[in-house]
Amino acid sequence: MRDQKSVNGMQRAELAKRTGCNLETVRYYEKAGLLPEPPRTARGYRSYDSAHERRLRFVLRARELGFSLDEVRALLRLADERDQPCAEASRLASVHLAGVQAKIADLRRMESVLQTTIAQCGDGARPDCPLIETLFREDDSRRKRGDPATRSKFIHR
Amino acid sequence: MRDQKSVNGMQRAELAKRTGCNLETVRYYEKAGLLPEPPRTARGYRSYDSAHERRLRFVLRARELGFSLDEVRALLRLADERDQPCAEASRLASVHLAGVQAKIADLRRMESVLQTTIAQCGDGARPDCPLIETLFREDDSRRKRGDPATRSKFIHR
DNA sequence: ATTGACCCTGTAGCGACTACAGACTGTAGC
DNA sequence: GCTACAGTCTGTAGTCGCTACAGGGTCAAT
């Protein structure tokens, strides 16, 4: 539990190292209102304590679960202000969960098409590559539904 | 098959409508080197034909499968230049497939944590919200491995 | 002649960082 | 004291893949 021992007067680099957060991201989260502005030394250096570290861990953990910064802000407010935030937090998480599940469904569709076409390529010695041909063909599901313009709302990067 | 009939001298809006692509995105793809610069009318208006449409459909279909614009460029080059692009296309798609599968695994981890904590919230009448508490606790997998800084390489938005 | 719908260009914005330039500070070795 | 180097500070620009808009020109119909 060496990461959890109480330390005060840390600089930004140590806070970053202790939490596994990128150095610049700490400042970014501060500017974005996710972390409070820490006190400064006489020369203007940021000085963090374990409360800052705890809060940063919360943010990082929420980000790992895919919450947006807006959602993290909302969760932090619940953690700070409310003594019984369960209902609201649960609602927030449920909405987010639905988004995660929709993304999984989307990615699974991609996965299956990719697997199929890669399998069709097989030896790779034919003149018409099935993968390239698949990309030139119109989407089956769209053609069947007669719907020329429906695409996933999600942007995959 | 009304979308597939050959049309020449389309303007940008019609090409966009026929492919379901956003109007501005057509221009963006052109600037990004994914679509060739179309001939212009005397007054400088772009004039597309069915070859442009075919190429745009290719790009959109590849994007639906989650390929990055760089990958789409590579696929287009294969489709254009090589008579037997199977091996290379298949390699490209396999690398991409691995990325898709890693994202799915990542999202499934999020899903399971979210489901568990939402279930723990239950009635929502307890003073310590399990969801908030989970976010304050350090990541189990990381703590077990004694690894303070390993996070998913993927950015989920 | 005017209205409105199209087209053109360049540019700014999004989210969530990440990186860097240019200035200052703090410490260690000589 | 001098120098080197590592740390900190600020603001700003770049990333990806779009999306939107301002400010101008064009075209068809009324």
Image (tube, coloured by chain):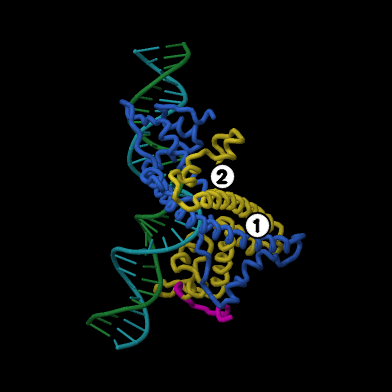
Chain colours: A blue, B yellow, C green, D cyan
- Residue displayed at 41% across by 51% down: A70
Q: Is residue C21 above or below residue C24?
A: below
Q: Which residue is mark 1?
A: B93
Q: Mark number for residue B152?
A: 2
| Picture coordinates of residue A61, whole percent (x, y) | 50, 43
Query: Quick check: can you spot residue B85?
Result: no
Three-letter code for the amino acid on which mark 1 is drawn: Ala
Query: Quick check: can you spot residue B132?
Result: yes
Q: Is residue A62 left or right of residue B85?
A: left
Q: Are marks 2 and 1 in contact (CB under 8 Å)?
A: no
Are discs 2 and 1 located on one and the same chain? Answer: yes
Chain holding disc 2: B
Q: Is residue A108 magenta?
A: no
- Rendered-image quadrant of the N terminus of chain B: bottom right
Q: Secondary structure at mark 2?
A: loop
10 Å crowding of disc 2: few (<14), some (14-19), many (20+): few
Q: Is residue B137 above or below residue A41?
A: below
10 Å crowding of disc 1: few (<14), some (14-19), many (20+): many
| Picture coordinates of residue A41, whole percent (x, y) | 33, 27
State how far apart marks 2 and 1 are (Cα).
22 Å
| Picture coordinates of residue A152, whole percent (x, y) | 53, 65
- Residue displayed at 51% across by 58% down: A99
Three-letter code for the amino acid on which mark 2 is drawn: Ser
Chain holding disc 1: B
| Region of the chain picked out in magenta, as a range | B1-13
